[in-house]
């Protein structure tokens, strides 16, 4: 009995120990599983936090880009747009002459005669060997001297060549600097007298120096019309794609992915309209503030974009904004006002035409084509007047000038009728455009003037146009218009063409003409 009880007790102990070990192993396994799950949760939480941070970071980049685009105007108000020509003057910059290894001559060879033989050496033929060694040394020394003289001669030739080349570099650098400084001097002199090319080039320089955000084109063109104190600006705008397509980034936890939220089309369109309106207003401010002698009273801004027509795949350049502004109109603006709205400003205050759907590249019609002010095309006063055989329009009589304008419109494709002379305020010519959409009846008045056309004539043209039931009124003069005339014409179907614009039209239709004021008083 005792032996059996002992065996039973040992078995129970062994079974209890086994169960205890199993429980311990199960507890260890469960603990390990809990730790693994905890580590998985921590890893997933860390990964989710990383994706949250990445989504937030990408969203902040989008918001920063939009903020940069929305402050194109306000961020530039503290910057002085003037370009000081004196600071642009160049000095010839040529590195100093570097002769390199030819700068220092090599040392001349030194004569080292062989050691004369002693008395004992002479007894055993040393004298003969000495004489032979001496002759060999003399021959080698003579050759070394000849080689040295040849090398020195070649070195001196290289020195002369390098000095000559350096002098040519200095002369070329001085010539280039003098030419550049002479152009600056000519521009500065031209600005003092209101020269067409000088003012155009200076204002182009002003606009090119204005820093814009990354991705904005840098191409601008400017044309000054002194007859009207007008500057025309052709500005290449950034494409609508400058507005980020994404509005924000989200972390979609169920898919463990960062996904963009697209920006609504209407929102992107409105932001882009605000951007191009800001560019126009910023350009007006920089030009008026940089105008050295207040030579400019009116600015025409045409903003176009170089892009591809998705329907044809061809390159197109549609105009997306156009306006005309006078200095007086612009002076009334408070651009730093936080509630200032650029699009509403250009539309209501300057009667600008802003594309309703710039994202679809719907174009607008420029208030004045840049070609009518392009200094590369228009240069009314020809210094070589005795050589120039083009007819001078100021030599025509008023009736001949009216006939000239009628012929010009006929060559442009209009059906024209010339009216009897009726004095200022009447109808000189009626032009009919057969185009079914933008055509109609145009009232044309021709002013053969050498002085600025008064605003009263522009008002009279508008009244005549309304009385005749015309689509548009066009006034063409050999002189120019003042800011009050342009201010009155803004937002009305009136087209004012000055002398520069008239010559541009003649150039486009291969009609030889020039405007040279010889001081003859016109009636």
Image: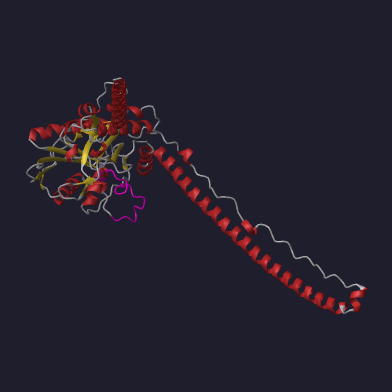
Q: Residue 187 at what x, y percent from top left?
A: 42, 42
In what quadrant of the picture does the C terminus appear?
A: top left
| Badge count | 0
In what quadrant of the picture does the N terminus appear?
A: top left
How is colour applied across the structure in the image?
A: secondary structure
Q: Residue 369 at what x, y percent from top left?
A: 23, 43
Q: Residue 207 at what x, y percent from top left?
A: 35, 38
Q: In the displayed image of the protein, which residue is found farthest to the right?
A: 119
In the rendered image of this protein, does residue 450 appear above or below residue 136?
above
Q: Residue 77 at what x, y percent from top left?
A: 36, 27
In the rendered image of this protein, does residue 115 appear above or below residue 370?
below
Q: Main secondary structure of the magenta part?
A: loop
Q: Is residue 82 left or right of residue 122?
A: left
Report the span colored magenta.
371-389
Q: Is residue 267 left or right of residue 441?
A: right
Residue 251 visible, this angle: yes
The residue closer to the viewer here, 217 or 172, is 217
Quadrant in the rendering for residue 142: bottom right
The residue closer to the viewer here, 509 or 259, is 259
Quadrant in the rendering for residue 43: top left
Quadrant in the rendering for residue 149: bottom right
Q: Is residue 103 left or right of residue 177?
A: right
Q: Image point 64% across, 66% down: which residue?
A: 154
In the rendered image of this protein, does residue 399 appear above or below residue 471?
below
Is residue 390 in the magenta section? Answer: no
The residue closer to the viewer here, 389 or 314, is 314
Q: Image point 46% across, 43% down: which residue?
A: 185
């Amino acid at each position: 009995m005792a032996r059996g009880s002992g065996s039973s007790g040992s078995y129970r102990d062994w079974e209890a120990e086994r169960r205890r070990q199993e429980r311990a192993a199960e507890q260890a396994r469960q603990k390990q599983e809990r730790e693994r799950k905890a580590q998985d949760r921590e890893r997933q939480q860390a990964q989710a936090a990383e994706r949250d941070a990445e989504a937030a970071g990408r969203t902040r980049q989008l918001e920063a880009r939009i903020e940069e685009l929305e402050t194109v105007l306000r961020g530039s108000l503290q910057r002085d747009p003037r370009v000081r020509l004196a600071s642009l003057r160049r000095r010839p910059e040529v590195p100093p002459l570097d002769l390199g290894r030819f700068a220092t001559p090599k040392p001349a060879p030194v004569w080292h005669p062989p050691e004369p033989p002693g008395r004992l050496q002479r007894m055993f033929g040393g004298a003969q060997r000495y004489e032979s060694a001496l002759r060999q040394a003399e021959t080698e020394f003579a050759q070394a001297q000849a080689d040295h003289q040849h090398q020195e001669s070649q070195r001196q030739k290289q020195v002369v060549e390098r000095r000559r080349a350096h002098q040519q570099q200095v002369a070329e650098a001085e010539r280039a600097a003098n030419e550049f400084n002479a152009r600056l001097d000519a521009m500065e002199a031209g600005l003092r007298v209101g020269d067409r090319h000088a003012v155009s080039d200076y204002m182009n320089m002003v606009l090119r120096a204005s820093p814009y955000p990354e991705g904005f084109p840098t191409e601008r063109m400017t044309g000054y019309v002194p007859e009207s104190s007008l500057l025309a600006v052709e500005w290449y705008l950034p494409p609508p794609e400058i507005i980020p397509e994404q509005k924000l980034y989200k972390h979609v936890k169920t898919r463990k992915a960062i996904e963009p939220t697209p920006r609504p089309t209407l929102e992107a369109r409105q932001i882009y309209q605000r951007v191009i309106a800001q560019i126009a207003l910023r350009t007006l401010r920089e030009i008026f503030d940089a105008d050295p002698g207040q030579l400019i009273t009116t600015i025409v801004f045409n903003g176009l974009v170089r892009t591809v027509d998705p329907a044809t795949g061809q390159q197109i350049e549609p105009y997306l904004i156009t306006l005309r502004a006078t200095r007086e109109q612009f002076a009334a603006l408070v651009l730093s006002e936080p509630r200032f709205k650029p699009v509403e400003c250009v539309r209501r205050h300057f009667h600008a035409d802003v594309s309703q759907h710039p994202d679809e590249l719907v174009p607008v019609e420029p208030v004045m084509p840049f070609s009518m002010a392009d200094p590369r095309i228009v240069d009314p006063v020809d210094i070589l007047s005795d050589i120039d055989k083009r007819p001078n329009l100021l030599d025509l009589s008023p009736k001949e000038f009216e006939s000239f304008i009628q012929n010009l419109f006929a060559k442009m494709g209009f059906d024209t009728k010339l009216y009897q002379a009726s004095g200022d305020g009447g109808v000189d010519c009626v032009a009919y455009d057969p185009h079914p959409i933008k055509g109609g009846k145009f009232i044309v008045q021709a002013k053969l003037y050498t002085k600025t056309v008064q605003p009263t004539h522009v008002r009279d043209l508008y009244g005549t146009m309304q009385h005749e039931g015309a689509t548009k009124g066009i006034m063409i003069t050999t002189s120019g218009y003042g800011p009050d005339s342009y201010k009155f014409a803004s937002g009305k179907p009136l087209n004012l063409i000055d002398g520069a614009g008239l010559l541009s039209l003649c150039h486009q239709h291969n009609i030889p003409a020039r405007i040279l004021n010889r001081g003859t008083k016109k009636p």
